[in-house]
Image (spheres, rainbow, N blue to C red):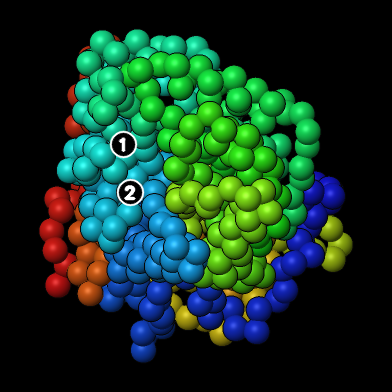
Amino acid sequence: MSASPDRPLVPEWLAVPRDVNALAAEVWPDAAHRDDRGEVVVGGVSASALRAQFGTPLYVLDEDGVRARAREVKAAFDAATARHGIHARVYYASKAFLSTEVVRWVTGEGLAVDVATGGELAVALAAGADPARLGLHGNNKSVAELERAIEIGVGSIVVDSLIEVERLAVISDRAGRRGESAQNVLIRVNTGVHAETHDFLATAHEDQKFGFSLAAAPAVAARIRELPSLRLVGLHCHIGSQIFGTAGFAESASRLADLYAELLAGGDLPVLNLGGGFGIAYTSVDEPTPIAQLAEGIVDAVARECEVRGVPLPNLAFEPGRAIVGRAGITLYEVGTVKPVVVSDELTRLYVSVDGGMSDNARPALYGAQYSARLAARVSDAAPALARVVGRHCESGDIVVDAEYLPGDVAPGDLLAVPATGAYCFSLASNYNYVPRPPVVAVSGGAARVIVRGETIEDLLARDLGVTGDVSASPLAASDRTPAPKESA
Ligand SMILES: *Cc1c(COP(=O)(O)O)cnc(C)c1O
């Protein structure tokens, strides 16, 4: 193995920690701490109690953390827009983490919900969400999905192609949705601004699937305005994910404002939806802009752009996903093997294999995402060793934490916690290698309860119509690692 520019032996940003047991506050859930036995405690429940009750791997979600972040983000956008005499609607981008329980938490805190498929819509409805406070996205919503959305009265639909506009108009018309009851739609606009974590790129021409170009949007708006079953209420744009700073949003708002001003000539446009993408800290070197500051920066930028064009400032909408759930989640794994690998004369890396991997967290394999890890059931004063936490799948790219210093005595049976896994881990989980997906446990006030049960071998075989052997006799039968939901003491 040799160093490559994008995967150096030791990443430049990774320093040997002063305390290899410390939990960086910006990365871990609110109030996560070590108790007097050195155990990580989240939501008042210790890591070994969680292991004893639910097994590993285990997704743990800090309910109070999700709720607190939902309140904080909503308050930030409410305050930032109130200064300009307008309103904000905050949609939770459900693809970050979706279950009925989480929908109830965020809607309970006043958020609306974004869904992008019929499946996500079904979960939101199963949670009892108000259809009028749902937004539907997607570049290729099926006819059945559009029909369902119209039938249940989804609040707004973001249209992504002219074919979809015509399709939706027919469905809406057939449902008798004309005039006052016409379906609210927004046009997804591609402003040519792409935000990366620390940078943004602005292009004039686009080569990707989402939305209409700034040049194409006016004709789409004109067409929608001709259709009696649709009501054009605004423009939507989403410039990317895991964005730090306001510069990308400001550039996008400036471009969107030109289009907005132009379209106002043809009728009302009461909403601009600026999407989500607000970044979180995955490791202690990430420094995301605090949400209140971000909200103010973005809203002020939009206000400025409207003012210079002499057009009224519309109400705004936002769609945070990761910023709501990301830091509230941790994943618990059990260490199975530890293997020192001599990488060069100077460097030995400890490969620490855990009982999960790319099936429960695809982000390192998909995006080269970085995470951190800590021993969860004990502290250690062993010297820090450079480690790579890897999964159990048949891929060398099956990495959970690419580079981290762990106590050099990390050993089989140790419980390892990876923080900041609340977003895009459960939702991107797979059954690769026929590994059952882990349960999700919500913790709050010292109690833990299963909100999504883990998969069993029986689940894995449930769709295979050729089963002839005895599934329950499998030595891997997972039913016994997923006890029935019960409250912890
Ligand atoms: C994914 C997505 C979001 C949420 O992104 P986060 O980075 O999780 O905030 C919001 N809006 C749209 C259209 C998206 O595709």
Classify mark 1: helix, strand or loop: loop
Q: Nearer the viewer, mark 2 or mark 1?
A: 1
In this rendering, the answer to whether 445 lies above or below 180 is below
| Residue identifier under label 1 | 155
Amino acid under label 2?
Ala
Name the residue: 18% across, 51% down.
483
Question: Earlier along the polypeptide chain: callout 2 or callout 1?
Answer: 2
Q: What percent of the width, then of the height, locates residue 488?
A: 16, 67
Q: Is residue 151 left or right of residue 60?
A: left
Q: What percent of the width, then of the height, locates residue 417?
A: 45, 64
Q: Is residue 408 visible?
A: no
Q: Which mark is residue 427?
A: none
| Residue identifier under label 2 | 112
Classify mark 2: helix, strand or loop: strand
Q: Is residue 66 visible?
A: yes
Q: Is residue 94 left or right of residue 358?
A: left
Q: Nearer the viewer, residue 73 or 384?
A: 73
Within 10 Å of the Cα at label 1, are there few (<14), some (14-19), or many (20+) other Cα atoms?
Answer: some
Within the image, what quadrant is residue 240 found in?
top right
Q: Is residue 430 left or right of residue 179?
A: right
Q: Nearer the viewer, residue 337 or 68?
A: 68
Q: Nearer the viewer, residue 147 or 438?
A: 147
Name the residue: 63% across, 44% down.
257
Tell whether label 1 touches label 2 (CB within 8 Å): yes
Name the residue: 14% across, 50% down.
484
